[in-house]
Every structure is written in structure tokens, then in C-alpha cells.
């Protein structure tokens, strides 16, 4: 299986571009699509899910243009949109039976898949509870279950951990990692930690453009020698934020442990620190902002 995005652009009314000349290709594994809110992630996900068409460029699935031949991809597609909703009065089994019918699964296959998936997403014991009483994490797990009903080759999840508590986010990331196997999983998020433990490839997007696509290790190499830490006072923080991009702060009894990305030591007592993916993401998006400034 192979998904190829070639010079993809999407323009909305008023001349606003959601995507500009976006190109990427990948096979089985987990692709983490990372970018700030408004970067174009959801626009790209909607095009890949055949919900909307690009203004320019094309997407091909196993060599076929999905805009011209969408049914071939739709048959093997699982999609969890950012604004996924449920019918609160239905229980998990009833909701999944309805979604299975929409996807065209026969009754016997649907019953088997629903039983399997409720076990996979750890909702078997809550299968008869109305969805209106589910937590945010439980609803997201129902969303994953409906996306997996047809055992998709391409699974797209758009901002799946928004609104989840830390424990639910960790569980959801582990679930996605377990599901990858012999399929393509695209995880779109603005939370870098969501892809850190699961993605085999990370694509950074900003202002509708692809900044970089690489393995996590390659992204870390981009900021090697550019990450610094030191102890500062709370009173110094405003000035530090004004001059340097902060990738983290930790309050301590002796002050604030400040972490910044900088080409040169940002303070006399700053020490080099091992880079993290958040540092690489901050560095790439900041470089993009600098290049976009008028000369």
C-alpha cells in the first residue's frame, strides 16, 4: 500500500490558502503530522479522507487519483475527524451497529467486528451504557472502534487527544501504536508528545506548507547543540521569553529551570541539553516565521 501526495494546494474563498504545494509519500507505519492550530492539518486530513477536493495537485492511493476514483480508497479507509460526535442515547453496540450499516458491512461480519473492537478499545464492560455517560476518552475510543470497523488499510485520526486528561492521552497513544501493524496510520496533532512515542515518521507543517518530513532521530539532529538549560529567577522570565523561544520551564526551590532553543549560549551559565522533539518542532516553526518576515 502506498499513499502519495503531490504538490497539493487548497484555496478557500477570499483567496485564503489552507495548503500550499504540499508533497509527501509514505507506506505502512505511523505518520505524525504536527503543526500549530490553523497550520492546514485538518484541511489535509479532509482531502485524504475524500471529503473535499484540492485546488491544485493530487493524492494517489496505490497509483490511483483519489479525487477521480474515491471509492477505491473509501473501501479501505478509517477516519476519526476532530469533531467526531456520538448519539448520546445509543449504547456502544447500537452505535457501532449503525456505523457498520453505513459502511456496508453485513450483519454477521458487523457483529463479529464489534465484539472484537470493543475488546481492543477496552470498552467491553461498558458496551451497554449510553454514550452520553461516557468520558471524553471513552468517546474517543468508540470513535477509533467505528474507524476500524472495516479493518482499514489507511487510518486517519485528526487531533484525537484534544480534551483528554493525561492518563487518557497516554492510553490513546498506546492504542494507536498497537493498531499500526500492516496499515498506514496518520495522526494529526498540535501536541508533539502525542507522536513522540508512536510515530515512525514525523511531518512538520506550518502555514499550509511542509517544513520537514523525517524520522524522529533526524528531527532531533536538527537541534543538536542548539538546546540550552539554566536556572533563572521568576523576575527574569519575561525578558528571557522576549529574546528566546522557550521549550520548557520547571519551577524549583532555587529558581526556574529554563529551557530554550538558541544558536548560541543564551546566558553565561547556560549548559547544553539533550534535544527533545518539542525542541525540534519549536526550532522549525520559528525558522519558518523568521523566513516569512518581510526583508
Image (cartoon, grey):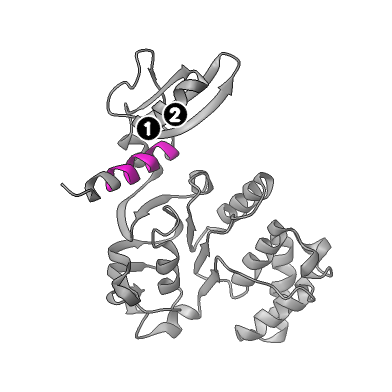
SS at badge 2 = helix
The residue carrying pointer 2 sits among few (fewer than 14), some (14 to 19) or many (20 or more) residues within 10 Å by Cα, namely few
Q: In this view, does 257 lie above or below 135?
A: above
Camera-nearest residue between 161 and 292 = 292
Q: State the image coordinates of residue 131 (x, y, percent, origin top left).
A: 77, 69
Q: State the image coordinates of residue 108 (x, y, percent, origin top left).
A: 72, 83
For the N terminus, the quadrant is bottom left
Write down the quadrant of residue 221 in the picture.
top left
Which dot marks residue 242? 1
Write down the quadrant of residue 88 in the picture.
bottom right
Whether the residues at callouts 1 and 2 have beta carbons within 8 Å, the answer is yes
Q: Is residue 17 above or below residue 13?
A: above
Q: In this view, does 112 lie to the left or right of 129?
A: left
Q: Mark 2 points at which residue?
A: 238
Residue located 32% across and 66% down the image: 19
| Main secondary structure type of the part rendered in magenta | helix
Q: State the image coordinates of residue 66 (x, y, percent, origin top left).
A: 37, 79
Residue 286 belongs to magenta span? yes
Residue located 54% across and 17% down the image: 255
Which dot marks residue 196? none
Q: State the image coordinates of residue 26 (x, y, percent, origin top left).
A: 36, 61
Residue 79 belongs to magenta span? no
SS at badge 1 = helix
Looking at the rendering, the stretch of residues picked out in magenta corresponds to: 278-288
Q: In this view, does 19 lie to the left or right of 156?
A: left
Residue located 60% across and 15% down the image: 253
Q: Is residue 26 above or below residue 190?
A: below
Amino acid at each position: 500500500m502506498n499513499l502519495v501526495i503531490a504538490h497539493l494546494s487548497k484555496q478557500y474563498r477570499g483567496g485564503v490558502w489552507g495548503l500550499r504545494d504540499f508533497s509527501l509519500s509514505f507506506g505502512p507505519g505511523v505518520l505524525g503530522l504536527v503543526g500549530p492550530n490553523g497550520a492546514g492539518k485538518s484541511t489535509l486530513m479532509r482531502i485524504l479522507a475524500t471529503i473535499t477536493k484540492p485546488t491544485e495537485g493530487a493524492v494517489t492511493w496505490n497509483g490511483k487519483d483519489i479525487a477521480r476514483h474515491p471509492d477505491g480508497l473509501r473501501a479501505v479507509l478509517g477516519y476519526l475527524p476532530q469533531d467526531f460526535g456520538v448519539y448520546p442515547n445509543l449504547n456502544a453496540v447500537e452505535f457501532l451497529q449503525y456505523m457498520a450499516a453505513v459502511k456496508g458491512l453485513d450483519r454477521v461480519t458487523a457483529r463479529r467486528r464489534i465484539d472484537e473492537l470493543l475488546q481492543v478499545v477496552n470498552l467491553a464492560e461498558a458496551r451497554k451504557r449510553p454514550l452520553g455517560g461516557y468520558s471524553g476518552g471513552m468517546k474517543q475510543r468508540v470513535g477509533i472502534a467505528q474507524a476500524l470497523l472495516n479493518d482499514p488499510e489507511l487510518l486517519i485520526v485528526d487531533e484525537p487527544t484534544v480534551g483528554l486528561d493525561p492518563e487518557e492521552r497516554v492510553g490513546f497513544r498506546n492504542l494507536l501504536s498497537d493498531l499500526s501493524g500492516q496499515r498506514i496510520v496518520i495522526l494529526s496533532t498540535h501536541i508533539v508528545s502525542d507522536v513522540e512515542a508512536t510515530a515512525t515518521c514525523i511531518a512538520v507543517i506550518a502555514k499550509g506548507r511542509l517544513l520537514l518530513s523525517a524520522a524522529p532521530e533526524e528531527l532531533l539532529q536538527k537541534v543538536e547543540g542548539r538546546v540550552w538549560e539554566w536556572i533563572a529567577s521568576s523576575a527574569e522570565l519575561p525578558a528571557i521569553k522576549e529574546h528566546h523561544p522557550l521549550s520548557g520551564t520547571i519551577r524549583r526551590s532555587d529558581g526556574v529551570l529554563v529551557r530554550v532553543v538558541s544558536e548560541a549560549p543564551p546566558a553565561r551559565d547556560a549548559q547544553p541539553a539533550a534535544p527533545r522533539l518539542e525542541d525540534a518542532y519549536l526550532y522549525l516553526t520559528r525558522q519558518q516565521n523568521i523566513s516569512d518576515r518581510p526583508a
